[in-house]
Image (spheres, helix red, strand yellow):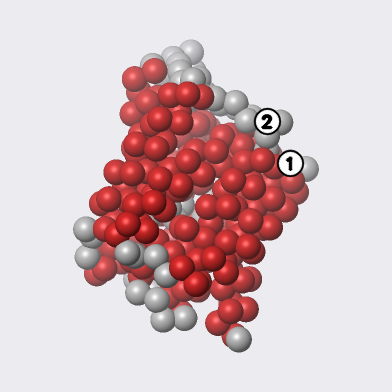
């Protein structure tokens, strides 16, 4: 009973966190590992569980979502699916020990990019990203998301900021759309590779969906500076945890 409660609570909070700041996998992954699931399988299972939360979060931000400069929504969809498929395929061939070692470095990179995103945009004022660079950025981040998913929201927010988006609510809406797309294709590949524990995944889906919608609607009323500070703090805390508990 304790394991079920832990997974439900972790999934609900993770769904809300993903819809606002990203980092939901930082909760679902440890919760699954704590209940005895191997880390690579826990990563895949937690990602499956968070898919409905991404969809719910995207719906919650539906009034604000718009494509970033340099990309159409159609192209964004294709790039998200291609990148997610590539990352998921890579996860299937990654040894569990190697996966544990690289995770905290990926999180640290994502947090740094988001924290310094406004300064980097200032340096690039008047120089909009070319469609090719924008496409390469989305493809690369989508591959990261298909591989690990943890910190994906932070990395997507950083990318959209660098591409020229200025509204944090618009960035959050688009972040959930891209996350849902790349996670959907990754889930298919995970399932085909046999690395998903479906009883836990289905249980956590329900809680993550509720958390994703609640988080998205609440975030639209939070001042942008507070939200940005919370995103950076989340990234730093979770990075430190993964360094300490590899």
Residue 8, given in percent of the width and then of the height, sits at 61, 71
Q: Which residue is mark 2?
A: 64
Residue at which label 1 appears: 220
Rounded to the nearest angstrom, the CA distance separating label 1 from label 2 is: 9 Å
Q: Describe the element under mark 1 as helix, strand or loop.
A: loop
Horizontal and vertical percent position of residue 62: 68, 34
* CB contact under 8 Å: marks 1 and 2: yes
Residue at the spot 46% in from the left edge and 79% down from the top edge:
34
Q: Secondary structure at mark 2?
A: loop
Left or right of 16 in this view: 32: left
Q: Position of residue 142 (x, y in %)?
A: 39, 40
| Residue that extends furthest to the front in the rendered view of this protein | 192
Viewer-nearest of discs 1 and 2: 2
On screen, residue 228 above or below 63: below
Residue depicted at x 68% and y 58%: 210
Specify whether 40 is left or right of 175.
Answer: left
Image quarter of residue 65: top right
Residue that appears at 46% across and 31% down: 77
Near mark 2 (Cα within 10 A), the count class, few <14, some 14-19 or many ≥20, is some
Give the image location of residue 28, x and y in percent: 51, 66
Vertically, is 233 above or below 112? below
Single out the residue that lies furthest toward the right. Answer: 221
Between 18 and 198, which is closer to the camera in this rendering? 198
């Amino acid at each position: 009973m304790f394991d079920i409660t832990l997974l439900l609570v972790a999934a609900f909070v993770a769904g809300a966190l993903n819809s606002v700041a990203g980092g939901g996998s930082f909760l679902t992954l440890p919760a699954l590992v704590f209940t005895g699931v191997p880390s690579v399988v826990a990563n895949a299972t937690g990602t499956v569980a968070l898919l409905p939360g991404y969809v719910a979060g995207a719906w919650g931000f539906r009034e604000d979502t718009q494509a970033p400069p340099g990309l159409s929504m159609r192209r964004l969809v294709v790039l998200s699916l291609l990148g997610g498929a590539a990352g998921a395929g890579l996860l299937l061939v990654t040894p569990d020990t190697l996966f544990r070692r690289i995770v905290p470095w990926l999180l640290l990179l994502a947090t740094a990019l988001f924290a310094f995103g406004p300064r980097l945009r200032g340096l690039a004022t008047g120089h909009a990203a070319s469609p090719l660079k924008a496409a390469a950025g989305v493809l690369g981040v989508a591959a990261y998301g298909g591989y690990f998913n943890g910190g994906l929201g932070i990395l997507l927010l950083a990318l959209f900021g660098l591409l020229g988006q200025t509204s944090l609510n618009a960035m959050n809406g688009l972040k959930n759309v891209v996350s849902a797309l790349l996670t959907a294709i990754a889930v298919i590949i995970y399932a085909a590779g046999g690395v998903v524990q479906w009883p836990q995944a289905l249980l956590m889906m329900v809680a993550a969906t509720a958390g994703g919608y609640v988080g998205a609607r609440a975030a639209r009323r939070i001042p942008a500076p507070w939200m940005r500070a919370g995103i950076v703090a989340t990234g730093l805390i979770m990075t430190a945890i993964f360094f300490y508990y590899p």
